[in-house]
Structures are given as C-alpha cells and as structure tokens.
Image: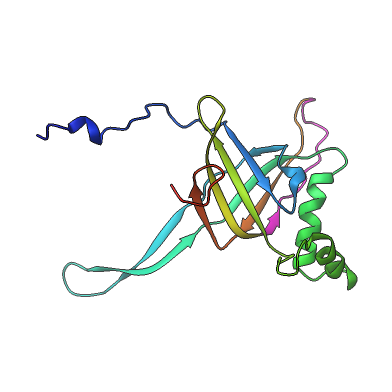
Amino acid sequence: MSENWYESQVQNRNYLSPIGFLFILEKARKISYLCQSTSIPTLTVGAIDIPTPGMAPMRLDGNAQFMDLEVEFLIDEDLTNYMQIYKWLEALGTPAEFDSRMVWRREKSRAREDNPLTSDATLQVLNNNNLHNFDVVFKDLFPISLSTLGFNVTMGDNEYMRATATFKYNYYEIRQPNKTNKL
C-alpha cells in the first residue's frame, strides 16, 4: 500500500446540494428568478456493436451526444416569462405573421455577429455556504418545446402554475466561476 494513500482521497467532504443553483438564460432572463428545477444533462458516447460469433467486441463511434436540457419555472400571472419562451419558439418556427421573425431578430441581436435565434445559458451551482462554486455553460441553446398550461378548478389554493421548457444546444462546459478554464 502506498505511503500517501490519503492524497487520493477527496479533499472537500461537503456534498453537492440540489437546491443551490441559479439559472441564467441570456435571451429570456425573466425565467431565471422563478426557475424551480433543472439538471446537468446526460452526456453519452455511442458504441457500435460488431456482430461476430462468440463474444461481440464493442467499438466507440467517437461522437459525444448531449441530451436535452429541461428547465422548470413558475409562471408569473401576466405570463411575462412564459411569453419570452413562446415568442422565441414562434420566431424559430413558422410565425403566423411574416414580420414576427424579423422583429424577434431585431430585438434580440446585440451585435452583428450575434445569432438572434440561439443563446448561451449558465447554470451557476452554489456550495454549502451558498457561494458560487462552478458554472455549467450551455453554448448556442434554443428552445424546442414549451409545456402545456393546465387550468383546473379542483386544485388547491397554493399550487401555482409551472411550465417546462426543453432546449437543444451544441455542447456544455463545466467551468470555474467567472473564468474560461474548465474544471
């Protein structure tokens, strides 16, 4: 056994808490404050089955696949945050009015090189002292679905409306806070 066995042990013995986070979406900032849940999506690398007699060897296909990002948020009674995602989806699809997409692009473009149809998003994860611990930065994110809003008179008084927005993105990076280098 190595003399320095303790060096391979985890130095920080505090556990990651699921309630300490802040989600920031550049093109729809109003869902950030009322964000209730999200997650770091699954990352997979594909494998290729090679049919042979006996034991089948596996080969990596080499392509990293990032699963969809889902964000659940409370909806304000004026639908302000819900409509931010709704209008974004409308601009991505075929809007009812021809000018809708151009209006969206004009409003959301800050610079000529900025793509008005995608946005970067950051999941800031906090430590056990509620201090900024690390960032998960999602690049070129865009919505692909927005959940149903169900109205029901039999619900209790304190149950508020929630919506789930599902996003696609190119990739995500896990970084140290306020830095560009990865963990």
Residue under the point 37% across and 29% down: 12
**Left or right: residue 143 compared with residue 155:** left
Question: Given the current orientation, which residue lies at the most extreme left position?
Answer: 1
Q: Is residue 177 magenta?
A: no
Q: Choose between 53 and 40: the one closer to the eye.
A: 40
Q: Judge whether 38 appears above or below 56 on screen.
A: above
Residue under the point 55% across and 38% down: 125
**Left or right: residue 18 compared with residue 48:** right
Q: Is residue 146 magenta?
A: yes
Q: Main secondary structure of the magenta part?
A: loop
The quadrant where residue 22 appears: top right
Q: Choose between 156 and 121: the one closer to the eye.
A: 121
Q: Quadrant of the N terminus?
A: top left
Q: Which residues are magenta?
A: 142-157
Residue 157: % across, % down: 80, 25
Q: Choose between 104 and 77: the one closer to the eye.
A: 104
Residue under the point 17% across and 32% down: 4
